[in-house]
Image (cartoon, rainbow, N blue to C red):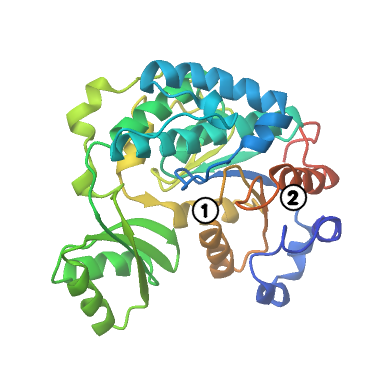
Amino acid sequence: MFSKLRRLIKSDYLRPSSASMQSRVPSGSRHEPPRLLFAFHGRNKTWPDVGCQIYREEAIFREAIRRCSSVAEGLLGFSLSDFFAGLDVGSADSLEQDEQRNLVISSVLELALCEVWRSREIEPEAAVGISCGEVAAAYSAGALSLEESAAVSCSVARLLTQKPLEGHFVWLDVDFERALQLCRMSPAKLDVFLEISPISSLAYCTSTDFPDIQRFLSGNHVTHRAKTTEWAHHTPGSNALSEIAEKLYKPKPRPLDIPLYSSEAGGLISPGIVLSADHWYWAAVLPAMFGRTICATMADGFNVILNVCGHPSLKGGIQQSATTLNKRIFILDTMRRGESELMTLDESFQALSASGLTKARSTH
């Protein structure tokens, strides 16, 4: 299976998690059957024409956007159809509105891409989600309708834009437990909120505290890098759930059709389970345990991971996790910034189809 995938498309589109891993793969792994996992990365920084090419060329995508846009226009006054058609939607009136748009665009893009893959008879055996990506992950697992998913996405966008917090994201090259220990030791407030992989974490601090945090981390020989942000999602200071819970849309989830690996739960939620109506709101505000969650998928045998999103922001975390577990995996993208959307989608489709990963394939 893996040799067929490698021959089909260029190595930069589909590759093992690391080149060095190939020599360390146990011989039996070459005979493992392909198992497909859909990965939903949640909020990504969008770009001006994201999704526009697929919107023009794929009727299924346009219809999904139309249905989601009807919901978003009623709840947020924002036309997703106009955005993906490349029309002028006007500038956001505030920092909060701009972030709401980014969040909804990212979520609805993932929902519509699910429909595109479904139309091509590509269905996952399981789904994994992080943060607002858990909405589309649950949709692909059968827990929500498309319209319910769009409404939940709008509520998540409202929830996450109640408390802007300017500061710094700080990437730490340490595991989550060590990151928590550093937070307790730090002379200034440092909130770790994302487990990226078994060897990397993400934290937040205010701009005022950043110089002290830098000195503290350097003094403890912790490799780190930072980036400014206007939002501190998943941190205690940004959590407004208790304040606006009653105003959030409450869906009526159905039992899961397939396994859902949730970064909020830190692992597997089995088929047949009915998620709480508040699941997606907790997933948006609590620390996200993506590293152990993606590791759980690999431990369960999922070895072909399709990123169903715009730019796959956690792709590096997936690769790090596979290397740590000595797992041979292949990663495919649906879209990548700066590249032809249809070309990327079609190349991934060819790889999946040639490997028998279609709806007609018998289940594992």
Q: Which of the two residues, 237 or 272, is positioned nearer the viewer here?
A: 237
Q: In terms of sequence position, does the residue under pointer 1 or pointer 2 come before the other?
A: 2
Q: Residue furthest left?
A: 187
**Which residue is found at the position 44% from the left and 44% from the top?**
43
Around disc 2, counting alpha carbons within 10 Å, would you say few (fewer than 14), some (14 to 19), or many (20 or more)?
Answer: many
**Which residue is found at the position 29% from the left and 48% from the top?**
231
Q: Which of the two residues, 263 or 113, is positioned nearer the viewer here?
A: 113
Residue 57 image position (x, y, % from top left): 73, 31
Q: Is residue 176 above or below residue 65?
A: below
Residue under numbered circle 1: 294
- Given contact means CB atoms under 8 Å apart, are the residues at marks 1 and 2 in contact? no
Which part of the image, by quadrant, shows the N terminus?
Answer: bottom right
- Quick one: SS at disc 2? loop
Q: Is residue 221 above or below residue 260?
A: below
Which part of the image, by quadrant, shows the C terminus?
Answer: top right
Rounded to the nearest angstrom, the CA distance separating label 1 from label 2 is: 16 Å
Amino acid type, residue under disc 2 in the picture: Pro
Residue 69 image position (x, y, % from top left): 50, 21
In the picture, the disc for residue 34 is 2
Around disc 1, counting alpha carbons within 10 Å, would you say few (fewer than 14), some (14 to 19), or many (20 or more)?
Answer: many
Residue 50 image position (x, y, % from top left): 58, 41
